[in-house]
Image: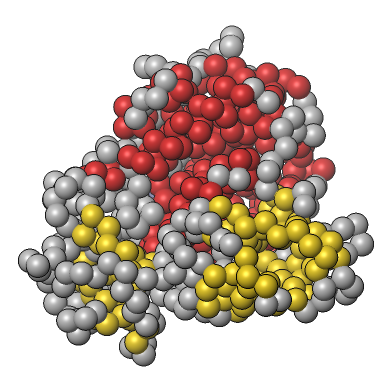
């Protein structure tokens, strides 16, 4: 049992079925990507231990299997389950008598990306144990894996921060996996090992944890590599759950707040500076700079989503919920092909001026995978974990996309919640409470910060809804009770944080974009758009969500913008306005 209890809990497998934009994408992602992966090929580097060029083929198995398990959790598919079971069996068979599962030959182990890759194997197996089957075999494999690592890296061996890339941050991010193995095995030595890892501070040059607690900006921690860094903080949260040490939680809270305020773009994406968009570099400020580098590695968005879900679960932080919604509807849906068969690495390049979307390539020529292609489906499937959750008093609704959810409310009774209305494109949402018999419980409804005026009627009775809070309704719920919500989807004009005069438009959680299929890209916007109510226009070919501005020009949602994935399909997010 963990020391600290989460505020919000994720529901068990198959309890939340999303049917809107995100739900359809999850279904496509399973059908067109996750069931088409050659899982045997992903295991081959482990079978052969031939990763002698110091690369990261070792990360793909764990990343993709984690994506597959999370997707199966929210949308149980028998064929996908068979593939997962087979590949778990396959990777376990690569374990040698010394407990090692690695793609690196013995003499190169602990160097380059080896520990990073072993982390993903352990995370994949741990998720299998937790979400699919508490298999004794998997438990033993995990225990042997970690004991093997502890024989190579530890207090009397090599230091974790002296292993691998990014100043030891990549290797140190194994912290979360170590906690998972501790939970599964109950072996105290693993918890002590996790505490030792955290004590090394995550980086060769300094303690990124201490600096984060002291309020340093994320760009100033270690070498600034965004998702390795966030993974270390994710691990620290897991250590907090086990130890209850309040300093760990405070450290991650400060780090998370700084990431939100300094690094995340208007589309819920982060990462810039290099040619792949993978570092922190005051990205929120620089998203409208032409020389900011390439923007927005999808892995950064996915890891930010995972960290946001952790913050929401542990603390009920509604800023984290708002970030999740924004990243999912913009950065995540916007990073995949419309049929979910492939993903982008950079999302997009850049946010200012016309740019196009580009499919992720073959990152290690001949291997056929890309890190973002591997992790994209994981971020997407998180939508269903976040949409409907529960606390000690009843269901918690975070997302109003069309959905069907079942939540246990008492030992005997479960409530079925039906959500309809076409959110987030349409503003009216109907929620129906289906029960076998009248039952007392508390229903929590997230009122987004962006919805400045929200009308809530429960069986005809009006409730006051405050933006950025949960509206808590405790009552005796009768079968068939209807809740009506009316969100404020009026247009918000967002000004570029660097004062450059560029603006972006948001309608509810959707960021709008100019798309070359709908008109000139980069043209100035009419002024006085703030607060306008725009109704959706009829869809066109590949663009389902289109809005007409007062000057008769058309814009679409960011996710659909550029989704033809060819160089002449450009789009733009930040624009100038015509002079008043
Ligand atoms: Zn990536």
Residue located at (43% from left, 37% from top)? 257
Residue lying furthest left in this view? 579
Q: Nearer the viewer, residue 228 or 498?
A: 498
Residue located at (87% from left, 58% from top)? 410
Residue 321 drawn above or below residue 24: above
Q: Nearer the viewer, residue 189 or 261?
A: 261
Q: Taking 495 as reference, is 410 left or right?
A: right
Q: Nearer the viewer, residue 530 or 12?
A: 530
Residue 144 coordinates in the image, percent (x, y):
71, 31
Q: Nearer the viewer, residue 488 or 567?
A: 488
Residue 383 coordinates in the image, percent (x, y):
56, 61
Residue 398 coordinates in the image, percent (x, y):
59, 60
Q: Taking 104 as reference, is 482 left or right?
A: right
Residue 498 coordinates in the image, percent (x, y):
19, 45
Residue located at (63% from left, 29% from top)? 240
Classify residue 19 by image quadrant: bottom right
Classify residue 574 by image quadrant: bottom left
In the picture, which quadrant includes the C terminus?
A: bottom left
Residue lying furthest right in this view? 412
Residue 117 drawn above or below residue 297: above
Colour scheme of the picture? secondary structure
- Residue 390 in view, yes or no: yes
In the picture, which quadrant includes the N terminus?
A: top right
Q: Taking 236 as reference, is 554 left or right?
A: left
Residue located at (68% from left, 53% from top)? 10
Q: How many numbered discs, if any?
A: 0
- Residue 173 in view, yes or no: no
């Amino acid at each position: 049992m963990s020391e600290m209890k989460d505020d919000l809990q994720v529901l068990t497998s198959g309890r939340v079925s999303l049917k809107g934009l995100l739900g359809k994408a999850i279904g496509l992602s399973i059908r067109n990507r996750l069931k088409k992966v050659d899982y045997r090929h992903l295991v081959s580097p482990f079978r052969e231990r031939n990763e002698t060029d110091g690369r990261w083929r070792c990360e793909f198995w764990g990343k993709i299997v984690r994506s597959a398990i999370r997707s199966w959790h929210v949308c149980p598919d028998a064929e996908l389950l068979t593939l997962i079971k087979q590949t778990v069996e396959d990777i376990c068979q690569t374990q040698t008598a010394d407990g090692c599962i690695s793609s690196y030959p013995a003499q190169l182990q602990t160097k380059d990306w080896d520990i990073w890759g072993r982390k993903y194997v352990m995370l994949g197996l741990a998720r299998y144990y937790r979400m699919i089957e508490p298999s004794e075999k998997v438990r033993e494999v995990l225990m042997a894996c970690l004991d093997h690592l502890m024989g190579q890296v530890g207090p009397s061996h090599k230091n974790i921060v002296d292993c691998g890339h990014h100043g030891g941050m990549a290797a140190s991010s194994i912290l979360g996996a170590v906690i998972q193995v501790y939970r599964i095995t109950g072996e105290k030595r693993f918890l002590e090992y996790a505490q030792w890892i955290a004590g090394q501070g995550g980086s060769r040059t300094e303690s990124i944890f201490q600096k984060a607690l002291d309020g340093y900006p994320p760009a100033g921690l270690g070498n600034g590599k965004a998702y390795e860094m966030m993974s270390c903080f994710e691990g620290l949260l897991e250590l907090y759950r086990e130890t209850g040490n309040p300093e760990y939680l405070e450290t991650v809270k400060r780090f998370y707040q700084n990431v939100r305020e300094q690094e995340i773009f208007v589309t819920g994406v982060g990462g810039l500076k290099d040619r792949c968009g993978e570092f922190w570099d005051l990205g929120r400020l620089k998203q409208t700079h032409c020389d900011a580098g390439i923007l927005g590695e999808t892995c950064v968005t996915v890891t930010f989503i995972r960290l946001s879900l952790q913050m929401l679960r542990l603390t009920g932080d509604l800023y984290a919920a708002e970030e999740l919604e924004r990243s999912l509807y913009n950065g995540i849906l916007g990073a995949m092909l419309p049929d979910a068969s492939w993903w982008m690495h950079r999302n997009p390049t850049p946010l200012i001026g016309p740019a196009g979307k580009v499919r992720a390539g073959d990152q290690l020529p001949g291997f056929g995978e890309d890190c973002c292609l591997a992790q994209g489906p994981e971020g997407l499937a998180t939508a269903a974990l976040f949409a409907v959750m529960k606390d000690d008093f009843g269901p918690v609704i975070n997302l109003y996309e069309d959905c069907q959810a079942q939540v246990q409310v008492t030992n005997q009774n479960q409530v079925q919640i039906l959500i309809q209305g076409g959110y987030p494109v349409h503003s009216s949402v109907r929620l129906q409470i289906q029960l076998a018999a009248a039952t007392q419980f508390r229903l929590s409804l997230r009122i987004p910060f962006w919805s400045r005026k929200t009308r809530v009627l429960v069986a005809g009775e009006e409730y006051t809804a405050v933006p950025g809070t949960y509206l808590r309704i405790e009552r005796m719920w009768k079968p068939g009770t209807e809740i009506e919500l009316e969100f404020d989807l009026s247009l918000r004009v967002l000004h570029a944080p660097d004062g450059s005069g560029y603006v972006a438009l948001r309608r509810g959680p959707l960021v709008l974009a100019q798309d070359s299929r709908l008109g000139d890209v980069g043209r100035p916007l009419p002024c006085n758009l703030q607060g306008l109510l725009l109704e959706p226009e009829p869809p066109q070919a590949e663009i389902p969500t289109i809005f007409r501005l007062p000057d008769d020009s058309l814009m679409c949602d960011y996710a659909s913008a550029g989704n033809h994935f060819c160089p002449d399909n450009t789009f733009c997010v930040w624009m100038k306005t015509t002079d008043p």
